[in-house]
Image (cartoon, rainbow, N blue to C red):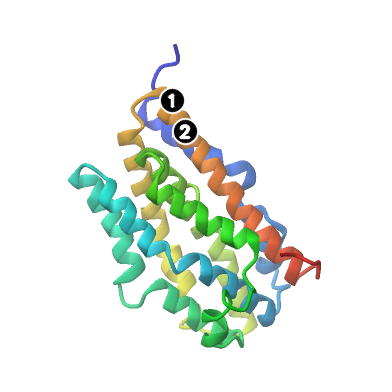
Amino acid sequence: MTAVLEKTSFQMELEEARRPIHSGMHPFSAAWTKGELSRQQLGEWAKQHYYYVETVGQMFGMLYVRLPDVEARLHTLDNLIGEELMGERHPDLLLRFAEACGVSRQEILNADLNGEILSGTRGLRAWTLELGNFRPVAEAAAGIMVGLEGQLPAMYIGYVEAMLKMGFTKDELKFFYVHIEGDDEHAANGLAISERYANTPELQERSKAAVRASAQMRYNYLTGIHRKFVLGEEVI
């Protein structure tokens, strides 16, 4: 019978689960960090990304109420506060970036009503809500905080460097800075929560699977954006 992995080995395997399909290796990310994307293309990304991030605070709230112990709830509350209460809400910071790209706030807010949200974007949002609402808390913490948030600091550093060269201001890029500064800690919180509740070999395997699935969902989300707004293909 397979034994429960000790803490360090389990955490290493969780982080390794996202590595083969890390969104930092996606062609869209590569084009972004090389400065090959226009403001218009970045604005289209922002339109899709807003649809995804606008429910992240609610997702953390749903996970918060399902956690049975105070320490784990405090870890998740830290994430929730970062999304909703520290200065400006993350979706509002994204709206600021979109406006700097030439996309109006109303265009972003009406994108769903106007049929502009891609299926890959809908899938990513639905997946995070599934994790927060229904999956065992070990899976949820791993999939959200390790599989998704844990990718962002390394990716966003390259994005920011490219956009500063394009003439964006640091204030316009605040959405990216707050994730560079905060998401390493959020990933650590996810590791701690998942390790606490993944107390059987099966739950450890399910947690690693959730990380892989999250990495796949984010990668596929970027694929839809890349195909439509960079390659000019028909994408729904």
Name the spot of residue 39 as percent of width and height, x first: 66, 81
- 44 lies left or right of 6: right
Evaluate whether residue 12 shows in this view.
no
Residue at mark 2 to residue at mark 1: CA–CA distance? 6 Å
Residue 228: mark: none
Which of the image's four quarters has the N terminus?
Answer: top left
Numbered marks: total? 2
Name the spot of residue 214 as percent of width and height, x first: 54, 48
Q: Quadrant of residue 80?
A: bottom left
Relative vertical location of residue 227 with respect to residue 35 in this rendering, above or below: above
Q: Are marks 2 and 1 in contact (CB under 8 Å)?
A: yes
Name the spot of residue 213 as percent of width and height, x first: 56, 43
Q: Residue furthest left?
A: 70
| Residue at the (49%, 33%) spot, across then down | 13
Label 2: state its secondary structure: helix
Relative vertical location of residue 100 with respect to residue 84 in this rendering, above or below: below
| Residue at the (31%, 77%) spot, across then down | 87
Q: Amino acid at mark 2?
A: Arg
Packing grade of label 2 (10 A; few <14, some 14-19, many >=20) is many
| Residue at the (51%, 65%) spot, across then down | 52
- 18 lies left or right of 82: right
For disc 2, the marked residue is: 206
Which of the image's four quarters has the C terminus?
Answer: bottom right
Label 1: state its secondary structure: helix
Residue 202: mark: 1
Q: Amino acid at mark 1?
A: Glu
Name the spot of residue 30 as percent of width and height, x first: 69, 61
